[in-house]
Image (spheres, rainbow, N blue to C red):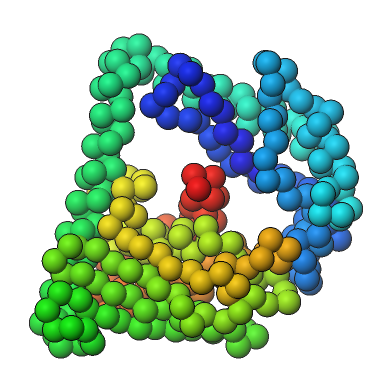
Amino acid sequence: MTSVTVSSDTDAARPFQQGHHADVGGITPGSMPPFSRSIADEGAAIKAFKLVSGGTFQEEGIAALLTHPETGSRGTRKLADNLSDLKAQVAANQRGILLLTELIDEYGLGEVQAYMGYVQDNAEVAVREMLREAAEALVAGDETEGDGEDLVCLTAEDKMDDGSVIRLRLTLDRTQGSAVFDFTGTSDEVYGNWNAPPAVTCAAVIYCVRCLVNQEIPLNQGCLKPIEIIVPEGTFLSPSESAAVVGGNVLTSQRVTDVCLAVGSRRSTHTHSVTRPFYIAHIAHRTLSAT
């Protein structure tokens, strides 16, 4: 569950973080059922709830959502743990606000906001440079289709164990240093739990893009400024709200990454040493939280 804290003292940013909870209900302990067929099988799904109001932790309200989920599923088996972890998340956000406030007091709000922008601008420039170089190299090697001038196109696909296809068409703009990741043609939502919310695909894309940038830049939203991601609704990469998704973050994310890197491997063998499954999972939560 993701907690976001809004503070008038830190207009430069809104601290948020995501916590993995031991159980939120569903048909099996741990809320990661291997054979879930709908979101109701996977426990509570909370879209939004004001966790702290007037400085008071809303224990009764959040407890009701966890013990009697709106999905109609069985409630949490670890309510005390859930409440303790949520309080820890709130405390972590408050610590973030304190540190941001100290930074603003020392340098001023304008300065802090400016440098936050500089970090993203630098990431954007680095990604655009990489995309231009990739397009130029591919055109020089005559390895692609395209219009012969500005656009370079690559395609790749892979399959899940049930045969569901992840299809990607990558279009690079040599002039703009931009890219379109188009997943049109990907298979429809499945009656299983390897459906993945769009944030998972966005996380896989930004991970792969960052791997191909041969510069030391922090991962941030600026990496996605030159990139458009198209994920058609109704596919198993953009399923309905009732779809089971517990496997999307740990299974489907890896296959999406494989497809993205299958295209990117024609550009570069440079990668960063990172434990990929957990890294992508954390990026997915951050991306989902920011949208």
Q: Which quadrant of the figure has residue 249?
A: bottom right
The quarter in which the N terminus is drawn is top right
Residue drawn 73% across the image and 50% down it: 45
Percent x, y for residue 253? 53, 67
Q: Which quadrant of the figure has residue 37?
A: bottom right
In this rendering, position of residue 18 left or right of residue 55: left
Percent x, y for residue 101? 42, 16
Q: Determine if residue 150 is in view.
A: yes
Residue drawn 39% across the image and 58% down it: 206
Residue drawn 81% across the image and 41% down it: 65
Percent x, y for residue 194? 65, 71
Of 34 and 180, nearer the camera is 180
Compared with 177, 6 (above or below) is above
Percent x, y for residue 150? 15, 74
Compared with 104, 233 (above or below) is below
Residue drawn 48% across the image and 69% down it: 231
Q: Determine if residue 211 is in view.
A: no
Compared with 75, 5 (above or below) is above
